Image: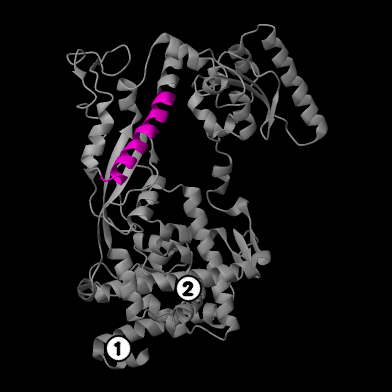
Amino acid sequence: MLNFFRQKGLTSIIYGVIIVGMILVFVLGFGPSAGKKLGPVSEACAARVAGSCIEPKAHRAAYRLAFSRGTGGMKQATASRIVLEGLIERELLATEAQRLGLSVTEDEITDGIFKGFILLSLPSDQAQMQRGLGIDDGRVNVGFKDPKTKQFEMKTYERLVKQITGRSPTEFREWQSRELLAAKMRDLVRAPVRVAEDEALDRFKTDRTTSTVSYAVVRRSWLEKYGISTEPKDIDTWSKDKVNLGQIKVPVRHVLVKFPSEKQEDKDAAKAKAQGIFDRIKKGEDFGKLAKEFSDDPGSKDKGGMYPGEMVEQFVEPFKKAVESVKPGELVPNLVETTFGYHVIKRDEASRDDVLKAYKQTRSLDLAKQVAQKVIADVKSGKAGEDAAKSATAQFGIVKPLSVRDGSVDAGPGAAQSFAADTDPERPQWNQSSAFNRSGETIPAISSEASQAVTNFAFSAKTAGDVLAEPLRTDDGFLVVSLKEQKAATRDEFDKEREAFTQQLLFAKRAEALGNYTRRLREAAKSEIKIDENNVMGAKSDAGAPRDEEDEGQ
């Protein structure tokens, strides 16, 4: 490095003096410790990795560096854990580097400081996140430059190190020594990774080949208006089936009595208390009042133990099964035990509107699948997609006025408007997607699961006109999909983007190789990694936060 200054004349001689001065300032405190494990300043450690202590102070400094511009909506506890995992990984890599005989010199540390970088380890499996944070290969560009001269300045360096990291210059050099060792180990792991031209071309063709599909959505909201009978006798017949009653979404109420521990005497006491509440409800006392007085669920007790019926699907299995076993208005005939404690559970009475809504949703979903299957059969038989979609609407051609009563439209000037099934905007219509690749958006406004199924079909189908054998479930019905076109990427297109694409692929492959290597290191050292949650920034506040209402209610 000193040869560099000799070649640059008087200006470089001045900076050479500065750097030599830096070395003299820090050599007494730093010299013997280069390339060795950091010793703890105190006994408090956010984590211990074999003989190394990751201090809370170091963890906080790394957090400030990584997320100086905010966490982008990520919870603090999550961001904090990512930073800690990076520091643990650093210790594993640095230890492995020492085992292989790698070391760090004072000149290397000083050179990095002079260039204005602070090295920071984040988990190797978060390579894309690092780029998003503006951290290029673990380097945070600070500068350490005088605002006026735009050149390295010692006082600026000392001030920024203290301000950003909360460390003295000596401690900072020790930190960067450990980071440099880890960086050398990363370079050693990534160096052998190469991308052959044939490999890059194959990957380019895979990534850049596009497909276009034709599709139609058979919406149950459309069929609720035109395909479902709302005659009282039909609704009554449907509602007498116990299976159908489980589809009616009415509020669910419960009283939760927690047991403070798994000791049998504690569980017996909780069960006796819950049984007493259950007996009082059976005798006619108000469920809501008893829930407010006795329930241990903060998410529902102030609401009389009530949760919307739609939330039941999110609850633990014993709770969910108990709710499904009774009709609206009924009390579950026994106490229900879950991991949260003992529950007294009741479903609210169903109104006529509740029954009608569940009836229409259930019947229309079944009918939507049948209509979608007919469209598929028509397309397979050679009918054009547009004609198949029109045929699907023909059997529901009766004009039905939209009314405020059944919720089809809002009250107002358009309340008297009416549509026919074959002109309603929600009817099945044959549409065409934009071209998409294997990682792109397929059809707007469908679930990620359905989108993945469309992708799998679009790139496995062989011939334009092929149709997906079964309709795909969507939030409001079923989706019919047919391959419109598949356009393969060409060698000429690859040649135009060769360099950038190959570099992108190389980055991904090296990140994958490093990720696999560090996972093996961590697995081998798992018994030597100890995390103290009491000293991890954000962990305490997270642990003390109330749980989501659905968790409390389970």
Is residue 146 placed above or below 5 in the rendered structure?
above
Neighbor class of circle 1 (other Cα within 10 Å; few <14, some 14-19, many 20+) is: some
Neighbor class of circle 2 (other Cα within 10 Å; few <14, some 14-19, many 20+) is: some
Residue 137: image location, x then y, percent = 39, 71
Specify whether residue 155 is in view: no
Q: Give the residue at x 36% y 53%.
A: 457
Q: Give the residue at x 23% y 72%.
A: 497
Residue 245: image location, x then y, percent = 53, 20
Is residue 158 placed above or below 313 in the rendered structure?
below
Residue type pointed to by label 1: Ile
Mark 2 residue element: helix
Dominant secondary structure of the magenta stretch?
A: helix
For this orientation, the residue located farthest to the front is 381
Q: Give the residue at x 58% y 78%.
A: 96
- Front: mark 1 or 2: 2
188, 398: nearer the viewer = 398
546, 249: nearer the viewer = 249
Specify whether residue 373 is in view: yes
- Quadrant containing the C terminus is top right
Q: Give the residue at x 33% y 41%.
A: 376
For this orientation, the residue located farthest to the top is 284
The magenta span reads 361-382
Side of 82 where 198 appears, left or right: left
The residue wearing badge 2 is: 513
The residue wearing badge 1 is: 13
- Badge 1 or badge 2: first in the primary sequence: 1
Quarter-of-image position of residue 312: top right
- Quadrant containing the N terminus is bottom left
Residue 445: image location, x then y, percent = 31, 41
Is residue 88 placed above or below 18 in the rendered structure?
above
Residue type pointed to by label 2: Ala
